[in-house]
Image (cartoon, rainbow, N blue to C red):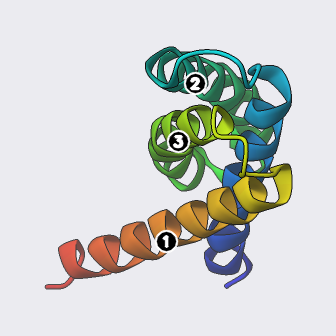
Amino acid sequence: MIFKIADFFIGTFSGGAMAFCIHMIIPAEINMFLGMFLGGAVGMVMMLAMMLVLMPLFGAFEVMIPLHINGMLVGMASGMLTTLSSVTSNHLTILGALIGFSVSIYIYFSNKYLTQS
């Protein structure tokens, strides 16, 4: 039971952490397309680092699938939104956490649907 609850925390925490770090790394003066590209790249690098830390604790399936989806979705969205001056790091962290949580919910229900007999 603890692993089912941990899945949602992994998705939410990784999404929020990725969004915050991407906002701190990418400068706000660049083009939105370049921000999206760099955000996706930074998200994938962070995903690999988080994957190496979390896989021995929670298993490959519970970590790899949410982190891969979060790495691209949160990375590209945060990279694009970083270029806007009205978006703060708090906004991006909340958005990243919501995206991560929704990805975890989607994976949970799709796995439940696919494993029914």
First-in-chain label (1 vs 3): 3
Within 10 angstroms of label 2, few (less than 14), some, or many (20 or more) residues? many
Question: In the rendered image, is residue 86 in sight?
Answer: yes
Q: Which mark is residue 64?
A: 3
Residue sitting at x 51%, y 43%: 77
Residue bearing mark 1: 102
Q: Position of residue 17 (x, y in %)?
A: 79, 47
Within 10 angstroms of label 1, few (less than 14), some, or many (20 or more) residues? some
Residue sitting at x 80%, y 52%: 88
Report helix, strand or loop for mark 2: helix
Residue sitting at x 63%, y 67%: 7
First-in-chain label (3 vs 2): 2
Report helix, strand or loop for mark 3: helix
Amino acid type, mark 2: Met
Q: Is 13 above or below relative to 47?
A: below
Mark 1 or 3, which is nearer the eye? 1
Q: Is 39 above or below relative to 96?
A: above
Tag 1 near tag 3, CB within 8 Å:
no
Viewer-proximal residue, 9 or 98? 98
Residue bearing mark 2: 44
First-in-chain label (1 vs 2): 2
Q: Position of residue 47 (x, y in %)?
A: 64, 31
Lateral position of residue 114 relative to residue 44, left or right:
left
Q: Which mark is residue 117?
A: none
